[in-house]
């Protein structure tokens, strides 16, 4: 049993494509190691507003982070800020917008790409600003942070699936194959994380449409998967909201917080 949490946000991953293409994750479900839920993203179904949603438990309408060009620090308590204040170690291998929300805004690659500062909400960060930054490299960045700093909370946030969706659209071999590649990369890291007893959440911010975009209310833009792996999850059937992920992680970390979450999902 381990109270440390790894949150993987596979940017732009539609639920159906995850179910059809991610054979390793589905194999974990068949072996009763993981459980899967369908989440509906909050609105608008855009990245930066939904990073804020996942990490603070507040919808974009509530947070004010309503589109991708709102470049400022979050005004809300996040998993990172709560963990940092309560003596936990935090780390993220993530797109630079995450650094802008919880560390320093605007992002300055020369200063922020490699972050090590215990005073910041994300104490140890490897941030990137290229949408085509390889998922394999990003997962290695996350694994480096895990091995080097042993964080209580680690965010791993690759971008290749979303990037393929913007270039080729939802119904494309390229988009589906990017999900298959992410599944293979995950299969390189998850066995060790599972054997070490981490509580692991794998989800997405939003899905994708055939217009090579997202932001609206279409089912394919809003429906994303959530995979839960670990002893602290009940693995029972429940409806989980995207706004409840933050509170769930805070509970797993043993933090004092006022974020919404579903007790029945945990044990
Ligand atoms: Zn996108």
Image (cartoon, grey):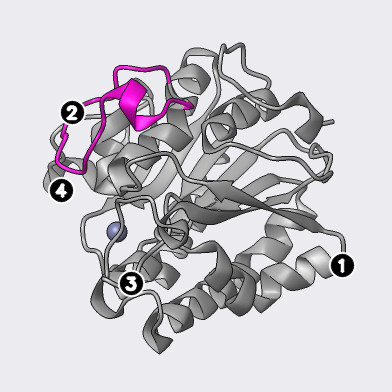
- Residue 115 x, y percent position in the rendering: 30, 39
Q: CA distance from mark 2 to mark 3?
A: 26 Å
Disc with the residue nearer the chain's start (3 vs 1)? 1
- Residue 60 x, y percent position in the rendering: 34, 31
Q: Residue at x 49, y 74 (%)?
A: 179
Q: Which residue is mark 2?
A: 72
Q: Residue at x 76, y 54 (%)?
A: 35
Q: Is residue 112 left or right of residue 199?
A: left
Q: Is mark 2 within 8 Å of ligand 1?
A: no
Q: Residue 264 colored magenta?
A: no
Q: Is residue 136 left or right of residue 146?
A: left
The quadrant in which residue 189 appears is: bottom right
Q: Which residue is mark 1?
A: 31
Cβ atoms under marks 4 and 3 closer than 8 Å: no
What's the magenta bit mostly, secondary-structure-wise? loop
- Residue 74 x, y percent position in the rendering: 29, 24
Q: Which residue is mark 3?
A: 165
| Quadrant the N terminus occupies | top right
Q: Is residue 237 left or right of residue 53?
A: right
Please tell me whether mark 3 or mark 1 is closer to you in this view: 3
Disc with the residue nearer the chain's start (1 vs 4)? 1
Disc with the residue nearer the chain's start (4 vs 3)? 4
Q: Is mark 3 within 8 Å of ligand 1?
A: yes
Cβ atoms under marks 2 and 1 closer than 8 Å: no
Mark 4 lies on a secondary structure that is: helix
Please tell me whether mark 4 or mark 3 is closer to you in this view: 3
Q: Residue 73 colored magenta?
A: yes
Depicted 24 relative to depicted 44: above or below: below
Q: Which residue is mark 4?
A: 109
């Amino acid at each position: 049993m381990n109270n440390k949490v790894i949150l993987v946000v596979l940017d732009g991953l539609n639920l159906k494509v995850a179910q059809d293409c991610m054979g390793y994750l589905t194999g974990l479900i068949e072996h009763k190691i993981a459980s899967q839920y369908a989440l509906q993203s909050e609105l608008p179904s855009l990245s930066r507003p939904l990073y804020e949603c996942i990490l603070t438990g507040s919808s974009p309408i509530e947070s004010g982070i309503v589109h991708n060009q709102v470049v400022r620090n979050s005004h809300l308590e996040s998993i990172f800020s709560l963990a940092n204040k309560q003596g936990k170690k935090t780390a993220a291998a993530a797109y630079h917008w995450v650094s802008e929300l919880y560390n320093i805004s605007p992002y300055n690659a020369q200063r922020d790409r490699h972050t090590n500062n215990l005073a910041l909400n994300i104490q140890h960060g490897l941030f990137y600003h290229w949408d085509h930054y390889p998922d394999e490299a990003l997962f290695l960045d996350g694994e480096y942070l895990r091995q080097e700093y042993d964080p209580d909370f680690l965010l791993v946030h690759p971008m290749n699936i979303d990037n393929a969706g913007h270039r080729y659209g939802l119904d494309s071999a390229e988009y589906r194959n990017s999900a298959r590649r992410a599944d293979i990369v995950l299969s390189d890291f998850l066995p060790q994380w599972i054997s070490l007893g981490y509580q692991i959440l794998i989800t997405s911010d939003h899905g994708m449409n055939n217009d090579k975009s997202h932001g609206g209310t279409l089912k394919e833009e809003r429906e994303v998967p959530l995979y839960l792996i670990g002893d602290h999850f009940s693995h029972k059937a429940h409806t989980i909201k995207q706004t409840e992920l933050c509170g769930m992680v805070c509970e797993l970390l043993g933090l004092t917080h006022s974020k919404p979450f579903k007790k029945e999902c945990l044990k």
